Image (spheres, rainbow, N blue to C red):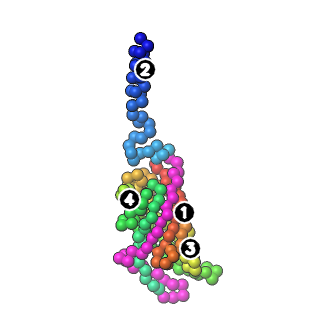
Amino acid sequence: MKTLTYLFVLAILVIAGCTKDDTIFETPDNLELKKANVPIPMKADLNAVPDMESALLEVHLPWGGSYYQPSKMIISGTGSHVGRVNAKKSFYEFKSMEIVIENGILFNYNSGIGLMVGANGDSFEYTWWVKQNMDDGNYYGEMDITPGTGTGKFKGSSGSGDIVGGWNMNRDGVCFKIDGYLVYK
């Protein structure tokens, strides 16, 4: 009788251990963190170089005259939630650029839109602005994910982040970091 009782208990443990717990994941794209409706940290280390095939943007100088530069930058790098950034599809685009002199220092105010695409194709659109010191190339700013533009794991997300960066060593592009958060609704 003891053996039968042990077999019966063992069978119940095996059945209970093999049942699927639907409270952990409903679908692979719908994690519990998304349901929590709380900010989820997001970080990225990125590089950008001019897209020489993009339209040219005219930039007016405060002392008169102007120059032209490519209106898009191609983004590469890595980030949390994104993984390796798809450099063939990720970019940011200048919508405005204003160079001003403040207290004898030349600054560049930039703003625009962008698209961040992960290696798996999941993406989101965003808006951004930065203020860059033209003497040393360092800049800071912010980015905001455009609600309703996310695909894949970013579907239903919004969020924002602080941008800090500067020219790369060759001064032919920029390196920057984003430190922010995502919220799913």
First reached walking from the N terminus: tag 2 or tag 1 = 2
First reached walking from the N terminus: tag 4 or tag 3 = 4
Measure the C-alpha gap from mark 2 to mark 3: 67 Å
Measure the C-alpha gap from mark 4 to mark 3: 28 Å
Considering only vertical position in the picture, is 174 above or below 44?
below
User: Magenta segment, which residues?
Assistant: 37-65
Residue 87 falls left or right of residue 39: left
* Towards the viewer: 76 or 70: 76
Considering only vertical position in the picture, is 74 above or below 135?
above
Indicate the position of residue 60 as horizontal and vertical percent values.
Answer: 48, 83
Residue at left 43%, top 68%?
75
Whether residue 125 is visible:
no
Whether residue 166 is visible:
yes
Q: Is residue 120 magenta?
A: no
Question: Badge 1: few (under 14), some or many (20 or more) residues near its Cα, within 10 Å?
Answer: some
Q: Are marks 2 and 1 in contact (CB under 8 Å)?
A: no
First reached walking from the N terminus: tag 4 or tag 2 = 2
Amino acid bearing label 3 = Asn
Residue 152 falls left or right of residue 139: left
Measure the C-alpha gap from mark 2 to mark 1: 56 Å
Residue depth check, mark 2 versus mark 3: number of the one nearer the observer = 2
Residue at left 39%, top 27%?
15
